[in-house]
Image (cartoon, rainbow, N blue to C red):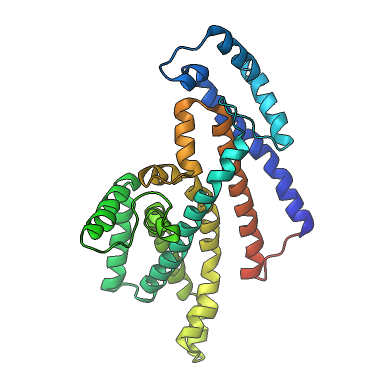
Amino acid sequence: MGRYILRRLIQAIPVLIGATLLIYAIVFALPGDPIAALAGEKRIDPNIVAILREQYHLNDPFLVQYWYYLVGLLSGDFGTTYAGVGVDEILAGKFQVTINLAMTALVMEAVIGIGLGLYAALRHGRASDSMILASTLVLISIPTLVTGFVLQLLLGVKLKQAGIDLFPVAGVADGWRSYLLPGFVLAGTSIAYLTRLARNSLVEILRADYIRTAVAKGLPRNRIVGRHALRNALIPLVTYLGADLGVLMGGAVITETIFNLPGIGYQLFNSVHLREQPVVVGIVTVLVLVYILANLVVDLLYAVLDPRIRYE
C-alpha cells in the first residue's frame, strides 16, 4: 500500500507540471500589459513600469518566466501579485469559502443523487422512475448560469419578500445558510448525472445471479439492497464523486460570481481579467493538487468497498 501511494504521488508530478505549464502559456498569450491593467485608465511613469517589468521578469521569454515560477513553487512560494501581495495570502483568505461551497455541493450531490438513483432503481419501469429520469434530463439541459439566477430570484428574493428568509442571495455573512442555495446550484448538473449513474448501476446489479440467489434464499429485501446490491454499486459512484470534487471547485467560478462569494473562483475570474499570472496559475495549481489527492483517496477506498481489490 505504501509503495502504491508513493508511486501515485510520483506520477502526479508530471501532471502538475503539465497543468501549470499549460495555464501559464494561456495566460502569457493573453493580449495586453498586466502592469497597465493594474493601473486601469491611469498613466504610469515609464520608469516605474520598467522597474516592475524587471522585478516580475516580464521582459524575459516565456520559458524563463515559467522556470522562475516553478522554482518558487517547489520551495512553497506561489509567487507575488503585481500589487505586491503574496498569492498564498490571497488563497488562504479565499480557499476556505470555496472548500465550504464545494463540500456543501458534494454532500447534496451524494445524498440526493444516490437517494434518487436508489429510489428509481427499485421502481424500475414505473411512472416514478420515468419521472426521475425526465427531471434529471431537464436539469442537465439547463445551464448553471440560468439555474443560479432563477433560484436566486425565486428562493432568495421572492421568498424574502413573502416574509420567509431561508436562503441568502449574496455573501457569506449568514454562515452555513449562505452556502445552501449556491451549493445546490453548483451541484445541480452533477446530481442529475449521479442519479442516472446510481440508477443504472443498481438496475444492472439487481439483475445479477447472486442477487437472484439471495432472493431465492428468502433474505430480507432491505438486506439484499443495502448489503449486497448497494455496496457493489458504490464503486462507480465513489469514482464519480471523487473526480467531481475537483470539477466542483473549478466550476465554482460562475456560482461564486452569481452569489458574490469571496472564494477562489471569484478571485480567478478577476485575476484573468487583470492578467495576474501568479494568482491564476496558483489557483490552478491548488485545484490540480485537490483533484490528484481526491483521486488517490478514491483508489484507496476501492479496497474498503471491494475486499478483492488489493494494491501491490
| Outermost residue, top side | 46
As displayed, is residue 87 above or below residue 31? Answer: below
Residue 227 at what x, y percent from top left? Answer: 54, 79
For the N terminus, the quadrant is: bottom right
As displayed, is residue 146 above or below residue 71? Answer: below
Counting the numbered discs, the total is 0
Residue 87 at what x, y percent from top left? Answer: 60, 35
Q: Nearer the viewer, residue 164 or 223?
A: 164
Can see residue 82? yes
As displayed, is residue 32 above or below residue 25? Answer: above
Residue at position x 51%, y 75% from top?
229
| Outermost residue, right side | 3
Residue 212 at what x, y percent from top left? Answer: 48, 82
Which image quadrant is residue 74 in? top right
Residue at position x 56%, y 33% from top?
279
Residue 262 at what x, y percent from top left? Answer: 46, 44
For the C terminus, the quadrant is: bottom right
Q: Nearer the viewer, residue 157 or 23?
A: 157
Q: Nearer the viewer, residue 112 or 90?
A: 90
For this view, does 14 lie left or right of residue 236? right
As displayed, is residue 74 above or below residue 95? Answer: above
Can see residue 142? no
For this view, does 254 lie left or right of residue 224? left
Q: Nearer the viewer, residue 109 or 230?
A: 109
Residue at position x 31%, y 66% from top?
132
For this view, does 60 lie left or right of residue 71? left
Residue at position x 42%, y 72% from top?
118
| Outermost residue, left side | 162
